[in-house]
Amino acid sequence: MSFFSDSSSDELLSTLTDILVKTAGSGRQSTITFSDLADKCASSLSLPSIDFSDPAQRKDFSLLLGMIADASYREHGFLLTAIVDYKSNFSFSTKEVNPGMREAMVRNGLAKNSDSDDKLQTVIWAQMKKIWEHYGTIRRDRK
């Protein structure tokens, strides 16, 4: 049994998006880790958890998150997946942006491949602020 083979991609995308929206609107400036997001999705759909030690499963999960990022950018003007734990999107210890997040920003015209990780981190924070404003977890008049 596998997380990905036991459920349709539409069902996975819908469930993952719902979890992200609930996280974004939870009443505080919330983020969620990759593993918590995967575990909540698996639990909601009665699936086994993702095996993050398996590169194929990590890649498939990243592809789903990329699809969510692209859809939310088209619909709302922000990458909903920016709230997937910023420590995973940007590592403070290495100062490197997660490759999947970088790809989503480039694909959606928010960054260039040549942009520094520091610049990309600024874009991630701006996306997070837009998400929290959209879902009412921070007031728009705050700077």
Image (spheres, helix red, strand yellow):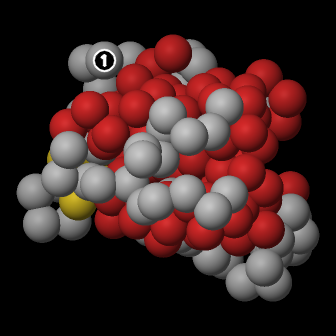
Q: Quadrant of residue 18?
A: bottom right
Horizontal relation, residue 34 to residue 90: left or right: right
Horizontal relation, residue 138 to residue 95: left or right: right
Q: Residue at x 46, y 28 (%)?
A: 63
Residue 9 lies, with reference to residue 119, above or below; the image says: above
Q: Which x, y percent locates residue 107?
A: 51, 15
Residue 55 lies, with reference to residue 132, above or below; the image says: above
The mark tally for this picture is: 1
Q: Quadrant of residue 31?
A: bottom right
Q: Quadrant of residue 74?
A: top right
Q: Residue at x 26, y 54 (%)?
A: 52
Q: Residue tagged by mark 1?
A: 113
Q: Which x, y percent locates residue 10?
A: 73, 31
What type is the residue that disc 1 sits on? Asn
Residue 137 lies, with reference to residue 125, above or below; the image says: below
Q: Which x, y percent locates residue 4?
A: 49, 38
Residue 3 lies, with reference to residue 20, above or below; the image says: above
Which secondary structure, mark 1? loop
Q: Is residue 85 visible?
A: no
Q: Residue at x 43, y 61 (%)?
A: 49
Extreme residue toward the front, this view: 1
Q: Residues within 10 Å of mark 1 (few under 14, many from 20)?
A: few
Horizontal relation, residue 39 to residue 97: left or right: right
Q: Nearer the viewer, residue 115 or 67?
A: 67
Which image quarter is the C terminus in?
bottom right
Q: Nearer the viewer, residue 132 or 59?
A: 59
Q: Which x, y percent locates residue 15?
A: 73, 51
Horizontal relation, residue 9 to residue 82: left or right: right
Q: Is residue 76 visible?
A: yes
Q: Residue at x 62, y 39 (%)?
A: 7
